[in-house]
Image (spheres, grey):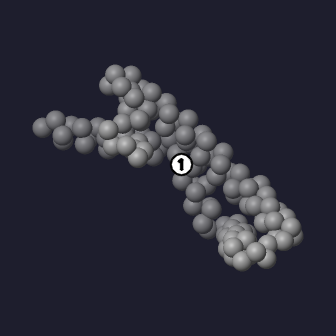
């Protein structure tokens, strides 16, 4: 049956992707976002500060020091080695996914990614 062949080919494709160094690094970097104690603590501090920022913004008590504190924490999160590793790994795996999409699209004769990806407001 054609569906069985397609399913088997999909499994082989996924297995090849899982063995790709960029996918291995991406998965490892993504896991580190949730397991590195220092980064998790920093992220929680940032999220707490964002909540306070929004609360102060809505009640009118937001001050310049609050804005500066949020920007400083945001900078620390974005420049943390764990975040930098994740961003680099995400960018590298995105290139791989784009290359795979191009190969599949060339064979199919249409942009596979645009058909397979999420749709906007219009379903037509």
Describe residue 8's horizontal placement relative to residue 14 as left or right.
Answer: left
Q: Quadrant of the C terminus?
A: top left
Describe residue 20's horizontal placement relative to residue 15 as left or right.
Answer: right
Picture residue at 36% right of the left edge, 36% below the top? 115
Residue 48 seen anywhere in this rendered image of the structure: no
Q: Is residue 109 above or below residue 123?
A: above
How many numbered marks have been drawn onto this rendered protein structure?
1
Nearest the viewer among 88 and 72 is 72
- Residue 38: x percent and y percent? 73, 69
Q: Which residue is mark 1?
A: 24
Residue 55 seen anywhere in this rendered image of the structure: yes
The quarter holding residue 74 reads bottom right
Q: Secondary structure at mark 1?
A: helix
Picture residue at 77% right of the left edge, 55% below the top? 79
Describe residue 89's horizontal placement relative to residue 101 as left or right.
Answer: right
Q: Is residue 64 above or below residue 82?
A: below
Describe residue 24's horizontal placement relative to residue 112 as left or right.
Answer: right
The quarter holding residue 21 reads top right
- Residue 72: x percent and y percent? 82, 63
Q: Furthest residue to the left?
A: 1
Neighbourhood count class around disc 1 (C-alpha, 10 Å): few under 14, some 14–19, many 20 upward: some
Q: Furthest residue to the front?
A: 60
- Residue 85: x percent and y percent? 68, 51
Picture residue at 18% right of the left edge, 40% below the top? 3
Nearest the viewer among 33 and 22 is 33
Nearest the viewer among 48 and 19 is 48
């Amino acid at each position: 049956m054609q569906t069985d062949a397609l399913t088997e080919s999909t499994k082989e494709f996924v297995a090849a992707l899982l063995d790709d160094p960029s996918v291995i690094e991406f998965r490892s970097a993504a896991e580190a976002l949730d397991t590195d104690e220092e980064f998790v603590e920093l992220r929680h501090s940032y999220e707490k500060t964002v909540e306070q920022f929004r609360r102060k913004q809505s009640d009118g008590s937001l001050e310049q020091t609050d804005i500066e504190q949020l920007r400083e924490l945001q900078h620390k999160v974005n420049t943390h080695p764990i975040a930098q590793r994740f961003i680099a790994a995400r960018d590298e795996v995105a290139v791989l996914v784009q290359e795979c999409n191009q190969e599949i699209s060339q064979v199919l004769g249409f942009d596979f990614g645009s058909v397979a990806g999420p749709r906007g407001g219009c379903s037509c």
